[in-house]
């Protein structure tokens, strides 16, 4: 990875995400981390820039180029999209709070709108999450058209950066004693695609997908959950009680949304 953007709205949630990002990226040379804030009123410019400079000092690391950037705009999503495209960002790390729409901060209410833009992978950091390691990563998959639907390039870029143990999980209430021929075929496709990471596959016969994944994450000490938002499948709609949205609000570990 070369460029990572961390949006800051000065809430404790966004500051925690910035601290998490600094620890996550420590030891990875050649990375530029942009601390990005959008303000609406001209009189907020000086204070915003000073705050970002102070945050830069707090997060300062020899191996990371931390760049504070504050811009005036009334459209946070549009400005973030333009910045991510211009900088060819590899990753955006954002904080989120609340278990419902009423409990969200500014960033929390905008995060899913940005994910829908499909600009680059977005890592959602739950409140209070402290970085410990990146040893175990969980990839969720619906095992439907896996070869075409799995974004191998951005996914492999993340995995190559941390070299974690990769777990691939599918949750389906129809799983019984043996996998169907269709699931066996899709498993083989994913296994070939991710061969360099030696993936381990798990098939859980649960009705509640969210509960199954979070329980698995707890049992296996998962450090990151990767999900692939799709228009038609296990992950359906981003804004109407969707799987990805629910998972982010309830997960105790960061969730990475990677688009196909």
Image: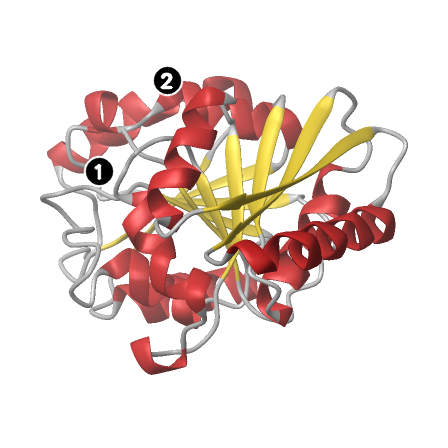
Picture coordinates of residue 72, whole percent (x, y): 49, 47
Q: CA distance from mark 2 to mark 1?
A: 14 Å
Q: Position of residue 39 (x, y in %)?
A: 51, 55
| Circle 1 residue | 143
Disc 1 element:
loop
Rendered view: 15 above or below 153: below
Tell which of 134 and 45 is nearer to you. Answer: 45
Relative side of 217 to 30, left or right? left
**Residue at left 46%, top 30%?**
84
Q: How many marks?
A: 2
Furthest-front residue in this view: 43
Q: Residue at x 39, y 30 (%)?
A: 82
Callout 1: few (<14), some (14-19), or many (20+) C-alpha neighbours within 10 Å? many
Q: Which mark is residue 192?
A: 2
Circles 2 and 1: CB distance less than 8 Å? Answer: no
Quadrant (top left/top right/bottom left/bottom right) for the C terminus: top left
Looking at the picture, does residue 162 appear above or below residue 168?
above
Which numbered disc, 2 or 1, marks the residue that appears first in the sequence? 1
Q: Is 150 left, or right, of 135 in this rendering?
A: left
């Amino acid at each position: 990875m070369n460029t990572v953007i961390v949006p800051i709205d000065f809430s404790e949630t966004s500051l925690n995400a910035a601290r998490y990002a600094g620890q996550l990226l420590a030891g990875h040379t050649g990375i530029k981390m942009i601390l990005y804030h959008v303000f609406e009123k001209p009189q907020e410019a000086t204070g915003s820039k000073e705050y970002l400079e102070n945050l830069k000092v707090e997060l300062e690391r020899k191996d990371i180029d931390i760049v504070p950037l504050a811009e005036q705009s009334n459209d946070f999503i549009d400005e973030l999209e333009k910045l991510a495209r211009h900088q060819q960002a590899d990753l955006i790390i954002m904080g989120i709070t609340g278990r419902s729409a009423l409990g969200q901060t500014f960033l929390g209410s905008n995060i899913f709108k940005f994910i829908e833009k499909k600009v680059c992978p977005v890592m959602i950091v739950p409140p209070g999450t402290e970085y410990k390691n990146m040893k175990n990563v969980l990839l969720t998959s619906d095992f439907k058209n896996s070869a075409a639907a799995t974004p191998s390039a951005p996914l492999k870029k993340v995995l190559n950066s941390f070299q974690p143990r990769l777990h691939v999980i599918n949750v389906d209430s129809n799983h019984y004693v043996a996998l169907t021929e269709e699931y066996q075929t899709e498993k083989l496709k994913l296994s070939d695609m991710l061969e360099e990471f030696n993936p381990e596959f798990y098939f859980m016969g649960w009705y509640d997908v969210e509960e199954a994944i979070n329980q698995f994450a707890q049992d296996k000490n998962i450090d990151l959950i990767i999900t692939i938002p799709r228009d038609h499948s296990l992950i359906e709609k981003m804004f109407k009680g969707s799987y990805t949205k629910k998972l982010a609000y309830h997960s105790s570990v960061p969730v990475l949304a990677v688009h196909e």
